[in-house]
Image: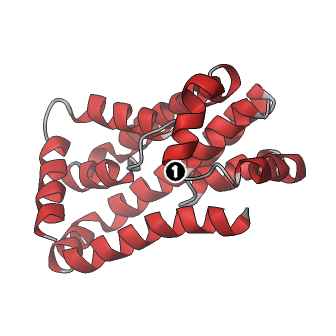
């Protein structure tokens, strides 16, 4: 827990530097296509550090995430053999890959919306959307709606309840770390169960 606490403090430090916005954008971008850590962590830290900028921060996070999703789509569409399969292997979704295609056939845009809003690994759905040739415009629209809904909801709640929430995080940091880790693992597990 000490290491995670140091990481949390380090992230909070970034939230107050002049590099905070570019770092938030980059993490949002890469998480949507291959990076395992969600941008919510930095978004939360930044809104807690500067609550008045919550709308701008949520917008930057949303734009970075949607552009990253488009990059993930490109990898799946054009470079699945070269790069995409390695990402799928990293997340151990080789055996479930065909079932993701079935989800797209059955639910189409709703699969992207659910993955973009929930703890499900969005990056798997961006790659698969490209690999299974989902309509690009529909994919971008679904990504924009779901990612913006998620990040604006997180930022708005923190804006509204930020200072008490920060005190709560400080007091129960270990518990929040366990809950967040559980949700992250649960998202991957849920996807494996669904498939």
Percent of width and height locating residue 161: 32, 68
Q: Which residue bears the numbered disc 1? A: 91
Q: Is residue 146 above or below residue 77?
A: below
Q: State the image quarter where residue 6 is shown.
A: bottom left
Query: Which residue is located at x 29 percent, y 48 percent?
Result: 42
Give x and y (percent) for residue 64: 46, 32
Q: Residue furthest right?
A: 106
Residue 134, image x and y in percent? 80, 33
Which quadrant holds the N terminus? bottom left
Nearer-the-camera pick, 81 or 1: 81
Color theme of the render: secondary structure
Depth check, front residue: 192 or 182 = 192
Q: Residue at x 67, y 19 (%)?
A: 78
Report the label total.
1
110 lies left or right of 106: left
Residue 188 in the image: above or below residue 33: below
Q: Residue at x 10, y 68 (%)?
A: 2
**Quarter of the rendering occupied by the C terminus:** bottom right
Residue visible at 48% across and 50% down? 152
Nearer to us in this view, 29 or 83: 83
**Residue occupying the far top of the picture:** 78
Nearer to me, 23 or 47: 23
Is 129 displayed left or right of 71 in the figure? right
Structural crowding at the residue carrying mark 1, measured as other residues with C-alpha within 10 Å and reported as few (<14), some (14–19) or many (≥20): some
User: Of helix, strand and loop, which one carries label 1?
Assistant: loop
Residue 164 in picture, x, y percent from top left: 23, 73
């Amino acid at each position: 827990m000490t290491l995670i606490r140091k990481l949390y403090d380090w992230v909070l430090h970034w939230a107050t530097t002049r590099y905070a916005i570019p770092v938030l954008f980059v993490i949002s971008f890469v998480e949507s296509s291959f990076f395992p850590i969600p941008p919510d962590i930095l978004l939360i830290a930044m809104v807690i550090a500067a609550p008045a900028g919550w709308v701008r921060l949520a917008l930057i996070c949303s734009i970075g995430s949607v552009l990253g999703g488009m990059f993930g789509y490109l990898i799946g569409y054009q470079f699945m053999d070269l790069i995409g399969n390695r990402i799928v292997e990293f997340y151990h979704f080789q055996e479930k890959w065909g079932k993701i295609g079935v989800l797209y056939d059955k639910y189409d845009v709703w699969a992207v919306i659910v993955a973009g809003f929930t703890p499900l690994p969005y990056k798997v759905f961006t790659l698969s959307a490209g690999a299974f040739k989902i309509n690009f415009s529909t994919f971008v629209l679904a990504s924009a709606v779901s990612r913006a809904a998620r990040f604006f909801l997180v930022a708005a709640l923190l804006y509204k309840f930020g200072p008490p929430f920060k005190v709560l995080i400080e007091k129960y940091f270990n518990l929040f770390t366990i809950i967040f880790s559980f949700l992250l693992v649960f998202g991957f597990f849920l996807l494996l169960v669904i498939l």
